[in-house]
Every structure is written in C-alpha cells, then in structure tokens.
Image (cartoon, grey):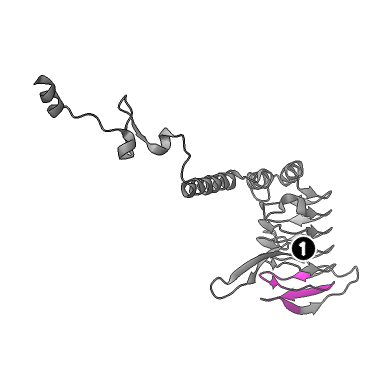
Amino acid sequence: MLRAMWSRTEPPPASAEAHGGGEHPEGAPYSRAASKGESLPQGTAVRLSKLGRRLTRAVREELHVPVQENLIRIVSRGLPQFAFNRLRTAALRAAGLRIGSRSMVMGPIDVTGPGGVQLLSIGEHSYITGPLHVDAGAQVRVGNRVHFGHDVLLLTMNHEIGPSEERCGALTAAPISVGDGAWLGSRVTILPGVSLGRGAVVAAGAVVTRDVAADTMVAGVPAVVVRHLDPGPRTRERSTPPPRPSEGD
C-alpha cells in the first residue's frame, strides 16, 4: 500500500539523455555539447575571431602616435613667433629635423604623412617664417638661401579621381624640390611632383601645379608665369618688408 502511494507521488527522475539537456546532479545546468566537451559552433568561432582581429587593429591604430612629428610640432609652437629663433632651430635639429647651418625657423612647423620627418631637409642660410605645413609622403628638399613666407604648404600627397560612388580615389605621392635661392610668398601651396628652379619666385597666395623654371616669377591659381627675372647678381628682391621710417624722417 505504502509502496503504491509512493510510486504515485514521486515519479522517477527523467534522464538527461531522454530530454537532451537538464541539470547536473548538483543542480548546475548543462548541455549535451558541454557534457561531451565539444567546442563552439564553427560560425560563432569565426565571428569571434573576426571581432578579435578588428579590436586589435583598432587599438593599434589608436595607439599609433608619431612621436618625432609631435615633438617637432610641440617644440616649434612652444616659443613665440619671431622670438627665440636660434633656440627653436637648435631644438628642431635635436628633435631630428635636418636643417643646414645658419638657417632659421621663426615659427611653427607641422610635418604629417607616412614618410615623416626623415623625408624633409632644409639647406643652409634658409629662412622659414612659419607656420609651415609639410605633408611628407615623398621626399621634400628645400635648398640653400630659400625664403618662406607665412602659411606655406608643401603637399606631396594627392588622390586619384575615382568613380562617382567615391571620387576620392587611390592615394598617390610625388616629391617636391625647392631650388637654391627661391622665394615663396605667404600662403603659397606647392602640389605633388613640383620642382621650383634656382632663383624662382612664387607670389603670395599662388597654387603651383607644375614645375617652375629657374629665375621665373609665377602667380595666381593655378600659378602662371608673370615675369622672367635677371639671373645676374644685381637682381635682388626684398623677402621682408622695408623698415619703417623713424619719427624724424
């Protein structure tokens, strides 16, 4: 009698094999795959692997800091414009920027691009007013006795024109060369692949898209030849404003 009542009120526990899941004897949930030590499904493993690679790449990109270029930016901007020029120039040399003897940097310099500071060189007896921005994806050579005005841009990188879905196409780079004795006015932009000849003059605000011959003055957007200069030693153009007259004049 008692045995029959017990069998009615307490049915035997169903096995985990019959239901495909359930609980461990201790009460912890489990699955058939876990009980057999099986790995995650293949699709889940692939998605987790891709996610891990993306996170790793994102962290590397965020932590990639161009130390030398940032050091040059900090050093050149840390001193007032036209003040402590010798100190600024010496500090930039110490930071790795190649500057010839008796050259002077009188304002900020920003160097960007994948090539970095190693692709930029400035010759002897040259004067950089600043700010100067160099996008160094290819070699940038500034010769001797070169004068730069304010806000000069030397851009070695460009993009090809792509299809209508995305007009900014593949990235390209070409070197820039500024010949000895050249003079670039304020807000001049030099585009990739341009070579300025010895003694060339670029008027303020010009955008130079092609090579400029020696002893030639160009102006405009895009820059065109406006004057041929005498190559003789008597040809002298002022690169700085004339001094102000004194009160007694």
- Residue 246 coordinates in the image, percent (x, y): 69, 58
Looking at the rendering, in which quadrant would you find the N terminus? Answer: top left
Look at 19% across and 29% down and name the residue there: 11
Residue 71 vs residue 33: left or right?
Answer: right
Image: 176 above or below 34: below
- Image quarter in which the C terminus is found: bottom right
Quarter holding residue 150: bottom right
Q: Which residues are magenta?
A: 201-225
Question: Relative to 230, does residue 33 appear above or below in the rendering?
Answer: above
Name the residue that disc number 1 marks: 175
User: Residue at the spot x=67%, y=47% of the render?
Assistant: 69
Q: Taken as a whole, is the magenta stretch helix, strand or loop?
A: loop
Figure label count: 1
Is 85 left, or right, of 143 in this rendering? Answer: left
Disc 1 residue type (three-letter): Pro
Vertical relation: 147 (above or below) 59: below
